[in-house]
Every structure is written in structure tokens, then in C-alpha cells.
């Protein structure tokens, strides 16, 4: 078996998947129809062009089902493969392969779907300064897996959670009593390695963020013309002050709109669609009885 990183959260997700599939009775079909000592090999194939992600999850599923199952990886995360490509070979007791088949494919299909979508989004901004990044709009419990799939597809990650970045959004501004109060509170609490990012939906708010000296501005739900004006103001401010300000565009983003948004000169384009709108791609596992 190819070595894979031990991830307690992934193992918990796999255990839940196996528990909901097997219930108290186990695999009644396999037990009734397949000899207990039968051995087999399974080929995991792509049934459409895709970008691979989730190979470690596939390996861990079979390890949880039966540590004696052998997994030979043919395509690693980030590989771009055509329909018919073999992604992995699994061999061992037929019972174990049949139990692990669906949970393993569910992980691989979902994560490869995200990577495949991310590759399309990354291609749309190729040659510009912009990077497409994900958000916290992820499947509960799957965030680390889905963010890894985003990277496999060529896009980048935003913060992982509420714990690793200061992002002052509209509701924080409202609850704090304004941008200035929210920024002051963040500066009092945050250590020097945390960049303070503030959401701005108008040019006036952008100017206020610049006056306060924040390190990053999220340009929220602006059309392309408004984005261009904001970028122009911020770059002029950078020339005058020597300070670097990261600009993130967010809201109402689509694959078709990405080139125009990137052309405005923003640094980041954040898209929840990277994860929450990705479809699972089609992979299958075909068994052959060992002779």
C-alpha cells in the first residue's frame, strides 16, 4: 500500500461513512453471494476527463476496512487525466474491496470534482496577477479535504477558519459601530503576524480603509467598473505611502466573469462556487476475480 498521511479527522469521516453504509448488519449482499476467501483486483478508472484529488482518502478508506488491502496509485492529486485512465489499483479480499468501493469512490469523486472545477477557474485568470481563492463555504467536516482539492486544481486557499485570519465583514462593522471601531478592536487583539482585512462595498469605504492603513480590502459585490475605480485608488495610495494593500474581489463571481475581474488588477478573487457548486465527477471501480 502507498503510504498516506494519518489524519484523525479523515478517519472519523471514513468511519461515519462506513457506519452509515454497513449499519448493524454489515454488507448482506456480499456476505450472501461472495465466498469469504475470494480475492480480487479492482481498477479505479476515470469515466470523463478530470483533475484527480482525494487519493489519500481512497487509500485510507481501504486501510480502515482491511489493512491487508493493497492500493497501488497510478495518478496522484493534481494529475489531469482523460476518460479511461486508471487512477488506482486495489487488491485483496473481495469482501473488503466491495465494502470499501462506494465510500472510497464518494471521496474521490467529490474531491476530484472540486479540483476539476478549480482547474477551469485557474485557467480563466492565467497570465494575470489575480489568483482565485476559496472560502469557508465548504461541506461541514470536509474543509481540509476540499481546500486540498482546490490546491490540486491550481487555485489557492483563503483562511482555513475563524481562527487564522482577521476578516472584518459587514456584520462585524455593524455590530462594532463602524469600520474605525472594528479596526481598532482588531488591532488591539491581533498579534503582529495577522493581516487585518476589511470588507468594503463602496468607494467611500475603500477610502476609509486606506486612511486607517489596513493591510487588505475585500471589495464586495462591486461591478467591474467599480472594481477598476477601487483598484486605481488603492494603487495610487500605495505609490504615495509605500504600503502594500492586498485587494480581494468577492461576490457575484462566475467562470465567465473571471477574466474581466482579473483584468481590473485585483490580487485575489474569492469564490464559494469553487467548493459548494462543484459537481462530483464520474469514476468507477471494476473488479476482476483473482485466479
Image (cartoon, rainbow, N blue to C red):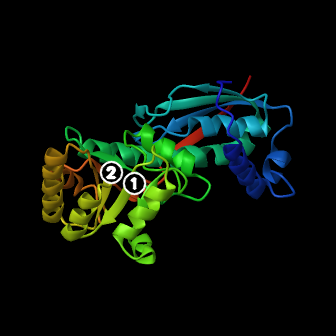
Taking the spot 69% from the left edge, 50% from the top edge, the residue there is 13
What number of labels is visible?
Answer: 2
Q: Quadrant of the N terminus?
A: top right
Mark 1 neighbour density, 10 Å: few (under 14) some (14–19) many (20 or more): some
What residue lies at 44% left-to-right and 34% top-to-bottom?
78
The spot of residue 113 in percent (x, y) is 46, 48
Is residue 58 something one can see in this rendering? yes
Does residue 271 lie above or below 157 as drawn?
below
Give the x, y percent position of residue 262: 20, 50
Quadrant (top left, top right, bottom left, bottom right) of the C terminus: top right
Disc sitting over residue 196 in the figure: 1
How far from the left and from the top, in percent, is residue 272? Answer: 41, 59
As helix, strand or loop, the secondary structure at mark 1 comes to strand
Q: Report which quarter residue 2 is drawn in.
A: top right
Residue 39 placement, left or right of 107: right
Q: Position of residue 125 (x, y in %)?
A: 24, 45
Q: Nearer the viewer, residue 145 or 174?
A: 174
Q: Are marks 2 and 1 in contact (CB under 8 Å)?
A: yes
Decide which of 186, 266 is in the foreground and name it: 186
- Give the CA distance from mark 2 to mark 1: 6 Å
Locate residue 241 relative to residue 55 in the image: left or right. left
Residue drawn at (42%, 37%) of the image? 83
Q: Tell which circle, 2 or 1, labels the residue nearer the N-terminal end.
A: 1
Find residue 215 and name its label: 2
Residue 127 placement, left or right of 79: left
Q: Secondary structure at mark 2?
A: loop
Above or below for 135 versus 108: below
Amino acid at each position: 500500500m502507498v503510504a498516506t498521511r494519518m489524519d484523525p479527522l479523515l478517519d472519523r469521516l471514513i468511519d461515519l461513512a462506513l457506519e452509515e453504509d454497513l449499519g448493524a448488519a454489515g454488507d448482506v449482499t456480499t456476505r450472501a453471494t461472495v465466498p469469504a476467501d475470494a480475492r480480487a483486483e479492482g481498477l479505479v478508472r476515470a469515466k470523463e476527463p478530470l483533475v484527480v484529488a482525494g487519493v489519500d482518502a481512497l487509500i485510507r478508506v481501504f486501510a480502515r476496512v482491511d489493512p491487508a488491502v493493497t492500493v497501488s496509485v497510478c495518478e496522484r492529486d493534481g494529475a489531469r487525466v482523460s476518460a479511461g485512465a486508471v487512477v488506482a489499483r486495489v487488491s485483496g479480499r473481495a469482501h473488503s474491496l466491495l465494502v470499501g468501493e462506494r465510500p472510497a469512490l464518494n471521496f474521490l469523486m467529490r474531491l476530484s470534482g472540486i479540483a476539476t472545477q478549480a482547474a477551469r477557474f485557474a485557467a480563466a485568470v492565467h497570465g494575470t496577477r489575480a489568483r482565485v481563492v476559496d472560502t469557508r463555504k465548504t461541506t461541514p467536516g470536509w474543509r481540509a479535504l476540499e481546500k486540498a482539492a482546490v490546491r490540486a486544481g491550481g487555485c489557492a486557499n483563503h483562511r482555513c477558519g475563524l481562527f487564522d485570519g482577521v476578516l472584518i465583514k459587514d456584520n462585524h462593522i455593524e455590530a462594532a459601530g463602524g469600520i474605525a471601531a472594528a479596526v481598532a478592536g482588531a488591532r488591539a487583539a491581533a498579534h503582529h503576524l495577522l493581516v487585518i482585512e476589511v470588507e468594503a462595498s463602496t468607494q467611500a469605504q475603500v477610502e476609509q480603509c486606506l486612511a486607517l492603513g489596513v493591510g487588505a480590502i475585500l471589495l464586495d459585490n462591486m461591478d467591474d467598473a467599480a472594481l477598476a475605480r477601487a483598484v486605481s485608488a488603492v494603487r495610487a495610495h500605495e505609490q504615495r505611502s509605500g504600503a502594500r494593500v492586498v485587494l480581494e474581489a468577492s461576490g457575484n463571481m462566475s467562470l465567465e466573469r473571471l477574466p474581466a475581474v482579473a483584468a481590473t488588477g485585483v490580487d485575489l478573487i474569492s469564490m464559494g462556487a469553487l467548493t459548494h457548486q462543484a459537481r462530483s465527477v464520474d469514476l468507477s471501480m471494476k473488479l476482476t476475480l483473482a485466479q
